C-alpha cells in the first residue's frame, strides 16, 4: 500500500513579522528549481497567511497552526477552520503539544478541532507525543496509541488525515529519539490507522517532529513508517528548511 508523497511541513509557531514573507518566497524558488520528491507546507502565524496566499506560490502550500472547536460565533480572538479554508489554507495543525500543554487542549478538544478542519475541507495534521516522564516510565506506546485513537474524529477520512509524532522532550531541545524508537512508535501508529480505516489507513502520512535538522533528517526520514517531518526552528530560514527538504532527493 503506497502512501501519498511525503510531506515536509514547517511550523513557524509565534515567529515571523511581515518581512519573513521573503523567506517563503525564497523557499518557493528553491523548491521550484529542485528535484524535491516531497510536498512542502509552511504554517506561518495567522497574521501572515493572507498576504502569503495572495502570492500564489506554486511549490509551497500554506497551512495554519490551530483552529477553534466551533465554526462561528462569539469567540473573541479565535479563528475558525472555515475562515482558514476561506483564506486558502490546505492544512491545519491540530493538538500541537504547545496547545495541549499551554492551552489545556485534551484529546476531546483536539478531536473536535480536527473535525472542524476536516469538515471545511482542510487536512488535519493531528499531533501526538509523550512527555519526558511518560517516556522515562516506558509508557510511550501506550500514550501515543491512546492519543491517536481518541484524537481522530468520526468524520475523518484517509485523504484528510495526517498524524505527526512529536515527543515533547524532543521539541526545541536538540534531542531526538533513536531511529529504532521512532520506527517503533510510527509502526504502532500505522497499526492503529489500519485498525481504524482498514488497509487504506496505511496510506496516511505519519510525520516525525522534534529537533529535525539537516544533519539528522536523512536518518529520520529513511525510517520505516516515517513519511515526512514537522519542523519548527529549522523551518524559519529558507536555506535551512530547504536542506531538510532536499533529503527527499535521496529518500524514496
Ligand atoms: P523544533 O523543530 O523546533 O524542535 O519544533 C518541532 C515542533 O514542535 C514542530 O511542530
Image: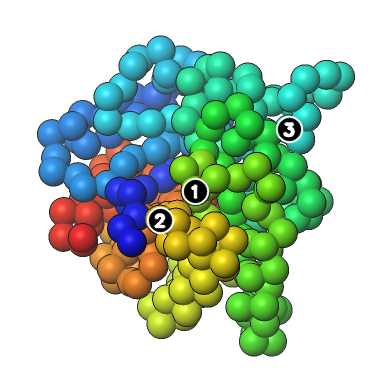
Nearer the observer, disc 3 or disc 2? 2
Residue 133, position in %: x, y? 70, 79
Residue at 21% across, 60% down: 252
Q: Nearer the viewer, residue 34 or 184?
A: 184
Residue at 42% across, 20% down: 52
Label 2 CB-ligand 1 distance < 8 A? no
Residue at 41% across, 12% down: 54
Label located before the other in sequence (2 or 1): 1
Label located before the other in sequence (3 or 2): 3
Residue at 67% across, 78% down: 142
Do callouts 2 and 1 mark residues in contact (Cβ within 8 Å)?
yes
Farthest front residue in view: 198
Q: Which residue is mark 3?
A: 68
Do callouts 3 and 1 mark residues in contact (Cβ within 8 Å)?
no
Label 1 CB-ligand 1 distance < 8 A? no
Q: Which residue is mark 1?
A: 158
Q: CA distance from mark 3 to mark 1?
A: 22 Å
Q: Which residue is mark 2?
A: 203
Amino acid at each position: 500500500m503506497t502512501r501519498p508523497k511525503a510531506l515536509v511541513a514547517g511550523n513557524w509557531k509565534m515567529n515571523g513579522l511581515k518581512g519573513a514573507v521573503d523567506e517563503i518566497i525564497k523557499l518557493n524558488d528553491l523548491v521550484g528549481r529542485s528535484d524535491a520528491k516531497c510536498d512542502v507546507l509552511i504554517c506561518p502565524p495567522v497574521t501572515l497567511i493572507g498576504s502569503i496566499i495572495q502570492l500564489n506560490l506554486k511549490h509551497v502550500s500554506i497551512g495554519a497552526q490551530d483552529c477553534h472547536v466551533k465554526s462561528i460565533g462569539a469567540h473573541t480572538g479565535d479563528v475558525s477552520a472555515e475562515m482558514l479554508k476561506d483564506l486558502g489554507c490546505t492544512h491545519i495543525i491540530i493538538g500541537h503539544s504547545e496547545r495541549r500543554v499551554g492551552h489545556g487542549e485534551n484529546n476531546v478538544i483536539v478531536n473536535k478541532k480536527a473535525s472542524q478542519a476536516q469538515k471545511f475541507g482542510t487536512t488535519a495534521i493531528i499531533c501526538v507525543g509523550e512527555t519526558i516522564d511518560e517516556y522515562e516510565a516506558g509508557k510511550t506506546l501506550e500514550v501515543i496509541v491512546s492519543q491517536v485513537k481518541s484524537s481522530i474524529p468520526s468524520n475523518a477520512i484517509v485523504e484528510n488525515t495526517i498524524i505527526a509524532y512529536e515527543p515533547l522532550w524532543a521539541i526545541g531541545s536538540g534531542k531526538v529519539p533513536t531511529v529504532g524508537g521512532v520506527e517503533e512508535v510510527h509502526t504502532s501508529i500505522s497499526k492503529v490507522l489500519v485498525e481504524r480505516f482498514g488497509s487504506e489507513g496505511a496510506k496516511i502520512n505519519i510525520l516525525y517532529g522534534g529537533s529535525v535538522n539537516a544533519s539528522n533528517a536523512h536518518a529520520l526520514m529513511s525510517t520505516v513508517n516515517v513519511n515526512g517531518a514537522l519542523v519548527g526552528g529549522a523551518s524559519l530560514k529558507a536555506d535551512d528548511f530547504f536542506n531538510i527538504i532536499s533529503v527527499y532527493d535521496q529518500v524514496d
